[in-house]
Every structure is written in C-alpha cells, then in structure tokens.
Image (tube, rainbow, N blue to C red):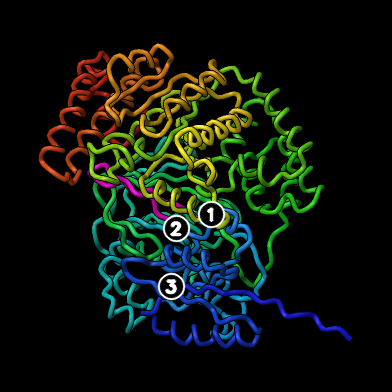
Amino acid sequence: MTTTPTVEHLCGVVVHPAKPRSAEALAALRRATRRRGWPEPLVAETTVEVPGADQLAELLTAGADRIVAIGGDGTVREVAGALSRSGPLADVVPFGVVPTGTANLWSRTVGLTDGSLESAVELALDGPVRDCDLAWVTVTRADGTARTHDVAVVAGVGMDAEAFATTAHDAKERLGWLAYFAALGRRAVGRPVRVRLGSGSGSAAGREEQVRTVLVGNCRVLPLGLPLMPSASMEDGRLDVLVVAPRTVLGWLGVGVGILARRRGGWTGLRTHRSRHVTVDLTEPTAVHVDGDPVGDAVRLELGVRPAAVLVRTRAGARDGEDEVRRLLAAPEPDLAALADAIHHGRRWSSDHAREHLVRDVFLGLSGADLTRFKSLLNSGPDHRDLEHLVFDVIDDEGVRADILGHIASEAERVDVPDLHVLSDIDDTLRCALHDDRYPRGTVYPGVIELYRALDAGRAADPESPGDLTFVTARPMDPAGLVEQHTRRGLRELGLPPHSVLSGTFAGLRNHDAMAGAKIENFRRFRALMPETEVVFVGDSGQGDVEVGRRMIATDRDAVRLVLIHDVVDTAADERDALRSEGIVLVDSPVGGALEAYAVDLVSATGLAAVVEAAERDLDRIQWESPEQERATRAIVERDIAKARESHALHGPAYKQGSRAVRDGKGA
C-alpha cells in the first residue's frame, strides 16, 4: 500500500488585534493548520499606522503561499489591495478571510459570514477559489490635492460618511453595527448634498441634484441581510451606484420599504444603475468614507473597478473564464470592456495550448479602433496583469505570440488618427529621489501630476480613455512582485490618471547604460504592442534618460513626438542646445515641460493653465529643508510660470476659460 504524502503550506496571517474576536479566530486557525500537518502560521499584527499592506509584503517575502486576513472590512481592503499588486504571486496565492469586524460587509457580500469561526477558518484555508473584483476611488479635496484608495466593498459620500465619521469607537464596541444606524438616524433630517453624477469613461456629469447619500461599490447586503445593492457582484467587472434622495422626511419611509422590498425608483427615494466608471462632483467639501473608514472631505470622487483583482476563497468555485470569452467573441458587436474583464479573470491562460489559441483568437477577432481600445483596457489595470504581461509572459508559444503581434502591426496601419501615449520615468521625473538637491527628498514635483493629465487629455479622442500613461522603469519585477507592488502603491496614492508600469530587471540596475538598455527594451515591447500610437517620453538628466530618448528617436523617429528631460544636474546651455537639435528638450520644471508640449500642440491651453495653477498650489505645500533651498527653487519654478503667463495661451479668454475649467473640476 502507498500513502499520499501530506502537502505542507505556509500560511501567513494578517490580524487586527483590537477586534474582540480576533484572538479566538487566530487560535482556531492555529488548530486548523496543526490538524493539516502544516508549519506554524506566520502572524503579523496590524497597527493604526501600518494597517496591513506592509505586513502582507513581509509574509510573502517569508514564503507564505496561503494568506488569511482576520479583521474587518478595513483589514480586508488593505490586504486584498496589496495582494492584488504583488506581481505573479497575485495569480497563485489565494486570499482567505475570517471576519471579526463590526459590519463585515465584504464577507457578507461574498457569503462568508454564516456559521462558526471554525467553519470560517476552514473556508479561509481550503475553500474553493474564485476571482473577485476590487474598486478604486480618487478623492480630490478643495485645495486640489488628490489621493487614490482601494475600495473593498463600498465608498460613499454624504450622510452615511458623516455617520461613520462621528460614530465613537466605544459605541461600535458596545453596539456593533447598530451604532452606525443610530448615527444615520440622527442625520435623517439634515441638509442634503448637491452633486453631479457621471457614469462611463469620458461621460459628462449630469444635472445638479440634491441627495442625501451616494454609494458606489459592490455591497450587496447590510447586517440582518438587508439588501443594499441586490444586483451587486464581486465578479462582473462593474460597480453598482445607489443614490438615496428622499424628498421629504416622510420620504424616508419609502427608502426603508424600498430596501426591504428590493424596490428601486419611483416613490422609494432610491435610484440605482451600474457602470465601470463613476464621477461624483460636489458643490462644496463633503464627508467621504471608504469601506466605513472616514477619509476626509472632498469636492470630487472618481471611481473605477479592477476586475479579477484578487483570488479569494469563498463557498462557490470560480466561473469559467474560457466560456465567458467564447460567448463574448460570438456576439455580433463586441463588448470590449467585458472581453478585457474576461481575459483578466483568465489568470492561467498559458496552462494549455488550447487556451493560448483562445487568447490569440480574441486579438485576431478585433480590428482597427476596436483593437486599440481593447489593448488600452487591458493596460488600464493597476496591477501587473496588463497587455505586456499577457503577450510576453503568459503566452509561452512563440508562434501564438508572433500571430498576435503580426495582427497588431497590420491593424495599426488602419488607424487614421494616432492617439498619444505618455511614457515616463519615475525617480527625479515624477518625484525627487536621487540626484536632485533642489527639493526635499520624496517631493512630488509641483504641477507634474497635472502635466501628466494634460498630456493624457491633450490629444486623445476620448480624454478619459484608459491606458494612455505608462511608467517605464529599470526597477526589477522580482519573483514576489514586491518591488513593483511598492512602485504601484506609491503611484496609486498620487491621484494619477489610469496607468500601467513596465518594469526592468535586476541586471538593469548595474549602471546608467544598463538602465537605459532596460528602458529601451521596454520601449521596443511597447512599440510592438501599440504601434498605432505616437509617444512622448518624459525622463530626467540623472540616470541615462537622455540616452533613452536618443535611442527611442533612433528606433522609431516618426512615432516619438517629444522627448522631455527634467534637468536635475544643471546641464550647460550649449549642451542643451545640442540636445534640442537632436529632438531632446531639457526643462527645469513641469511648467516648462507643459510649455514645450503646448508649443508642439500636445497640450491644450486649458491643460497648460491647469499645470500653472497646480504648480503654484503645490509650491506652497512643500516642507523645505532650508530658506536657501526654497528661495533658489522657487525662483526657477516661478520663472517658468511667468513664461507661461506671458505666452499666447495664457492671455485673455483662453487662460480665463482654462482656469475656470480647472476650478470647476473639468478637463480639457
């Protein structure tokens, strides 16, 4: 007789120690791993300052191949978001949840709250695996600053956010979720919120209206099984939008009946719809929450979905991604966003030859602008599973890859008006990091985020089209994906437009020539995947980016519209002139870069005005290291601002219109 050897798994646990049931849940998990003959689990506790993402990175580095979160929705959000950005490990390391929070909305939505802690632990360790979506929200404050947050279940603005902000911790401990409902009840007769809602990429906001709350996410049920968003799903690549707008105090009766009866519209004071992209513009700063955690006041929210962002252990198994792709391919009119979602859900397309051919069929079944749009949708996700990963990493068969790239090349010739794609370095280009001593280390350069937005919107037929910004870095994609996760997390928190990241290799870090070579290899891959686009490259003068720009121009001169180099080493004037003759333009600030882009019709007058206003605003927020540093750097930036104001673009109606559009939260 033979016996099957026990397969050992190392379980990594991120636990919120302050939750009352967390200690009991951790004890149950330890018992379960001992029964399986696994090593003792690795345990990392969250803190207020470090709520989960860094703990996950430590566990993955230590070799954990099972991840379990013990806590509430905030812990789930931190761990799930970080795991989704952990590179290749996101495709193979499953995520389990043992809910010990106050409301546990994530767990209720995916069906994990029935039964004992022991049964929850069993599911978290060995339950069926399925892909689950996450969402994101970019919160813009009245001063123009923006930050992007992961959303596990729901983000809200208005009355519910005010309730979360004012519910005391001890009340939550004593009353649980009833404390939230009590706080909501106290606000039922408060002042409504004036909003404009927009749905869909590039759509204009609708009419201004008075509401009490806007909720966006995938929160199917509340405690007691109350159906908040009955159609919400963690697997459909869409967000549910719920508007709560009773007209009178008695209208709250309609709201209550509508929720209980699963009715929306009409007399209920409830309105709902579904979308992949949502904007909420507010007439005044209003409280916002993310998964029940207050994040301050905002004047604008932008929300989107991240399909199949994380592998989750639930009661139900995974959906069949192959059947979904075949069904979508057979449709008369392709739903490109749904097709991209289905490909995102198919994590292991290279596991057999038939699946690789199915991916090839998807590409070969699309043409012209549809193919360009599909590629941009694949590129718009904030994790490693983008277009490059699919074609160059997932597809193993070189013949299949050649078929895909050949079709992309032939279809590119059918695109009449090429879109503009921005390729950018990060260190000393986006933020002060290595060679630039004019700013405190880590400073995001004044106006640079708005420069990316202006370039992204300046030429696109759809200014909100995804995937038009790519960061090209020599930083390596390590086996655990932790370097890239750190890179993506740092970018995500800045409120940037949708973007992708092309990583390098450890060999590319040897010297500046190696860094340049790594970035050029990324550029060649990018051109093979997006030959129908024109390119702006933004880099710095400290790490070989001048040579990168030179090689880009030599590789594909017709495609490279502009090479902007942020000068951080005081390049001499005659050398600057020589580089300009090659097509490489050195600038001293993002405002200078915007002026150069405006001069060649790559940035609109409105975009230039937005960069100027953002730079002025950002300068005042910098914590300078010395008065001398502030004085010298301000002189440089303010000189470029003065040049911008003196330019034709910022005289008269164009500048005034641009400034007003920026203040109103409108793009170019």
Dot placed on the residue nearer the N-terminal end, 1 or 2: 2
Circle 3 packing at 10 Å, graded few (<14), some (14-19), many (20+), is many
> What amino acid is labelled 3 in the image?
Gly
Vertical order, 387 against 47 (above or below): above
Q: Quadrant of the N terminus?
A: bottom right
| Residue 593 vertical placement versus 163 (above, below) | above
For residue 310, the mark is none
SS state under label 1: loop
Most foreground residue, 6 or 655:
6
Near mark 1 (Cα within 10 A), the count class, few <14, some 14-19 or many ≥20, is many
Query: Residue at left 65%, top 84%?
Result: 37
Q: Residue at x 25, y 35 (%)?
A: 614
Residue 146 position, x and y percent, is 32, 46
| Circle on res. 72 | 3
Q: Amino acid at mark 1?
A: Gly
Q: Residue 151 got which mark?
A: 2
> Which tag, 3 or 1, sits closer to the chain's start?
3
Residue type at mark 2: give it: Val
The segment highlighted magenta reads 135-151
Vertical position of residue 375 compared to residue 48: above or below: above
- Quadrant position of residue 449: top left
Q: Are marks 2 and 3 in contact (CB under 8 Å)?
A: no
Quadrant of the snapshot with the C terminus: top left
Q: CA distance from mark 3 to mark 1?
A: 26 Å
Disc 3 versus disc 1: nearer the observer: 1
For numbered disc 2, what is the local secondary structure? strand
Displayed quadrant of residue 320: bottom right
Tell me the residue that label 1 is attached to: 481
Of the image marks 2 and 3, the number of the one nearer the N terminus: 3
Q: Residue 209's x, y, as percent? A: 33, 46
